[in-house]
Image (tube, helix red, strand yellow):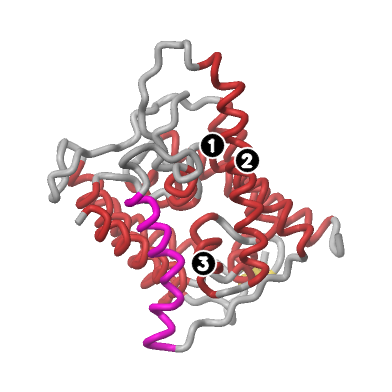
Amino acid sequence: MSIAWNAFTPVSALIGGALIGAAAAAFVVLNGRIAGVSGILGGLLRPARGDVAWRAAFVTGLVAAPLAYGIFAALPAIRIDAGPAVLVAAGLLVGIGTRYGSGCTSGHGVCGISRLSPRSIVATLAFMAAGFATVFVARHLLPGL
Amino acid sequence: MYTVTSFLAGLVFGLGLIVAGMANPEKVLGFLDLAGAWDPSLALVMAGAIAVGAGAFALMRKKTRTLLGAPLRLPAARDIDRRLVFGSLVFGAGWGLAGICPGPALVLAGYGAVKGLVFLAAMLAGSALFEFLEEFVGRRADKLPMQNRPHEDGSNRRR
């Protein structure tokens, strides 16, 4: 392992992380819910009466974030290297996996660890390990796949 | 008000993802690439988020109502089962393939990134497939005496 010091952005990482934490904190203190994106989105696929508006609002907030950011500053560049086939496979795995696992990086990783949930700690260790392993295979064992 | 605060929470969450670099799949993959030139930034994103979030969850631990008077709906599930572990492993594999998880997928849609929309469409299809399977396979499970309890992912689905 070597550390990519040129890519390391500790200040923006901490500020961005604090914003994410503040959003999750406000959401539990005001709305009494876990800010878990996969489940909030998933609940919209099988809508229940009185359970749609807040979910749609949260999702709209996430989608609107780059537009709001763009009003004040130039949006940071993004780069998606994966091709369409990989994106479809990845999306399907993320869609199914997060629902079977009852959460993703936000619900388990941020909220779950914040509330010291053993379930979420196990889930986070599992998806991090799988993420590390997948990138290792894709980049170092089977590059060019 | 409940809907407004929900929108604002989503907005601030999304802004945090952008500032943190989590909305950039290239940076996420740089974090997941332990064997390459490793970018540890995202560990600090998690640390920053948990440092701020932990206080709020500790505050709410003993409460039953929120500041808005809404009921507190925190996950009641305690069991570490196969669904949790295998589901999370499958999610991690998908995350590692593209460097995108559900929050950033929505932010990338807001960016207008076509590849982000392709990922989002597939992710929704995967989630819909889960709902479909639950509806059929889960019907038997519904006979078990289990509560309709909320989960970490914010869903209220029956199990």
How far apart, in angstroms, are the residues tagged by discs 2 and 1?
8 Å
Q: Chain of mark 1?
A: A
At label 2, counting other C-alpha atoms closer than 10 Å, the crowd grade (few under 14, some 14-19, many 20 or more) is many
Q: Nearer the viewer, residue A123 or A82?
A: A82
The vertical placement of B4 against A115, above or below, is below
Q: Nearer the viewer, residue A97 or B128?
A: B128
Residue under circle 3?
A: B22
Which image quadrant is residue A49 in?
top left
On-image quarter of the C terminus of chain A: bottom right
Q: Quadrant of residue B37?
A: bottom right
In the image, the segment drawn in magenta is A53-73
A126 displayed left or right of B15: right
Q: Main secondary structure of the magenta part?
A: helix
Mark with earlier residue (2, 3)? 3
Q: Label 1 amino acid?
A: Gly
Q: Secondary structure at mark 3?
A: loop
User: Do dots 2 and 1 share one subunit?
Assistant: no
| Residue B96 picture location, percent across and down | 66, 55
Q: Position of residue A131 (x, y in %)?
A: 64, 51
Q: Nearer the viewer, residue A47 or B113?
A: A47
Is residue B50 visible to us here? Answer: yes
